[in-house]
Amino acid sequence: MTNVVTVFDEGVDGTDAYMVMEHVRGRTLREVVQERGALEPREAARIVTQVAGALDAAHDAGVIHCDVKPANVIVDERGGAKLADFGVARAARGPAEHELIATPRYIAPERIEGKPPVAASDVYGLGLIAYEILSGLPPWEGLTTEELLRERLEAPPPSLRRARPGLPTEIDLVIAKALARDPARRYQRAGEMARDLAAAVRGEATQTMDITPPRARPLPRAPRTPRVSSTVAILAVAIVVLSVVLLFMRFGDVPALGGPTPTASAALVTPNVVGKSVSEAASILLGAGFRDPQGRREIPWELVPGATGAACSVVRQDPAPATSYRPGAAAKLFLVPPPRGSC
């Protein structure tokens, strides 16, 4: 399988088990997103298509991956994506152990309920990968593990367009179908999802038209009041407005009609990311609307020689916390140097 990290051998040395695997020169998809932010839709669709090919091949062989996430996808030097870490995978046709083994942020709802993994469980993980590389942020950012699991079972899928306004609705629908709570309502093969995502990116028709939006909760019914003639109501409102205008004009406390009126708007305040890891700090600042000096969805950083604290944690930020800013403003992080290497 071209898009799977090859395992050459396995064995046991004393009490230690080992595997001999292909060495792939590259970075994980998680690291790519942390560095670059949200990917362009065409690049994201290409990566999803490659991972989907690996999943379909594994599913055809009766193997469910069970831990599909950006940290388990390696992007090589040529931009090719390879799926790695089948460490928690298990045979779909064999006697299943149904214990909960996976990363909480990326686990499918049916797995939380203790049901056996199916191909659609991996499709759910692929949908979350697509969400993350298209939005630049992990799903359900900032929630505890318990809150993550509850959201998975009770709340609708996270809205991609809310995280990244401007994306076509068709892309959001593809992600929503991949993240359907009921596995029977998801894409049954990863390749189907990848083809729909690629079509949505190109502006072509997809298979997502059968998605039923979540049922809205009915609002409390207001008590019925007697109907009033619309003409009488309009006259009453006009009289009240005219009376108020005349009253304020008499005392000089209102600007002339047609002039500018004062407006109040809440100022945006820079979040405090000092002490956080560089990846967490960058995600927070990107989510707040900061960019790099060239306007890209990246937060540059610089090591501060002699700074103490956790390696690669933020010791200073620019702009400083609690200062006002405009969306799109540039930001920069200053980090504690690691003992060796780079952050």
Image (cartoon, grey):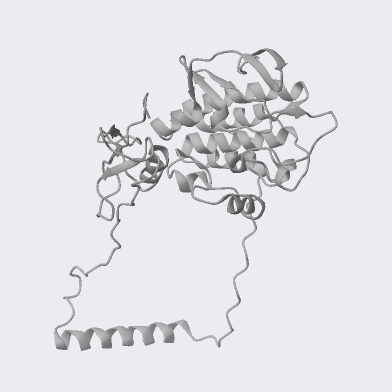
The correct choice, above or below, for 213 with respect to 117 in the image is below
Measuring 20% from the left and 85% from the top, which residue is drawn there?
248
Measuring 32% from the left and 87% from the top, which residue is drawn there?
240
Q: Is residue 29 left or right of residue 113?
A: left
Measuring 31% from the left and 39% from the top, which residue is drawn there?
308
241, 321: nearer the viewer:
321
Q: Is residue 343 left or right of residue 66?
A: left
Image x and y of residue 331, in percent: 27, 41
Quadrant where the N terminus is found in the figure: top right
Image x and y of residue 213, in percent: 63, 52
Measuring 66% from the left and 49% from the top, which residue is drawn there?
212
Image x and y of residue 30, in percent: 49, 31
In the picture as drawn, the residue positioned furthest to the left comes out as 252
In the picture as drawn, the residue positioned furthest to the front comes out as 14
159, 140: nearer the viewer:
140
The correct choice, above or below, for 83 with respect to 129 in the image is above
Where, by quadrant of the figure, is residue 215 drawn?
bottom right
Where, by quadrant of the figure, is residue 50 drawn?
top right
Q: Is residue 298 left or right of residue 60?
A: left
Q: Is residue 111 left or right of residue 337?
A: right
Image x and y of residue 341, in percent: 37, 23
Badge count: 0
In the picture as drawn, the residue positioned furthest to the top comes out as 8
Where, by quadrant of the figure, is residue 19 drawn?
top right
Quadrant where the C terminus is found in the figure: top left
